[in-house]
């Protein structure tokens, strides 16, 4: 059995199961799930979609 780890799309750090974080589909293509940890959200760090290269805060 393997456990899927969610990775912050901004800093690349694994997000633990009970850590405050947000996830949403890419606003441009909708095919990739963007994950953002609370620290990156608070700092307003940019994220990049791995499929379409969309960049957003």
Image (cartoon, rainbow, N blue to C red):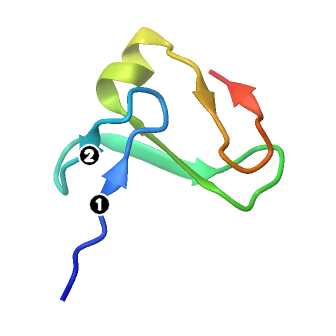
Q: Is residue 29 left or right of residue 40?
A: right
Counting other residues with Cα less than 10 Å from the Cα at mark 1, is it few (<14), some (14-19), or many (20 or more)?
few
Could you tell me how far apart the alpha carbons at marks 2 and 1 are, in whole angstroms? 7 Å
Residue located beneath label 1 in the image: 5
Q: Which residue is rendered at x = 26% and y = 46% of the image?
A: 15
Residue shown at 39% from the left, 27% from the top:
11
CA neighbours of label 2 inside 10 A, class few (<14), some (14 to 19), many (20+): some
Residue 13 vs 7, above or below: the answer is above
Discs 2, 1 touching: Cβ within 8 Å: yes
Vertical placement of residue 25 versus 9, above or below: below
8 sits left or right of 20 in the view: right
Quadrant, the N terminus:
bottom left
Does 31 sit left or right of 41 as displayed? right
The answer to which of 34 and 13 lies nearer the viewer is 13
Return the residue at label 2.
15
Residue 47: assigned label: none
Rendering quarter of residue 14? top left
At 31% from the left and 21% from the top, the residue drawn is 39
In what element is the residue under mark 1? loop
Q: State the image coordinates of residue 38 (x, y, percent, origin top left).
A: 32, 29
């Amino acid at each position: 059995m393997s456990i899927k780890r969610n990775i912050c799309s901004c800093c690349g750090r694994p997000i633990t199961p009970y850590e405050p974080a947000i996830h949403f589909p890419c606003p441009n293509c909708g095919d990739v799930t963007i994950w953002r940890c609370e620290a990156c959200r608070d700092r307003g760090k940019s994220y990049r979609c791995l499929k379409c290269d969309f960049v957003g805060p």
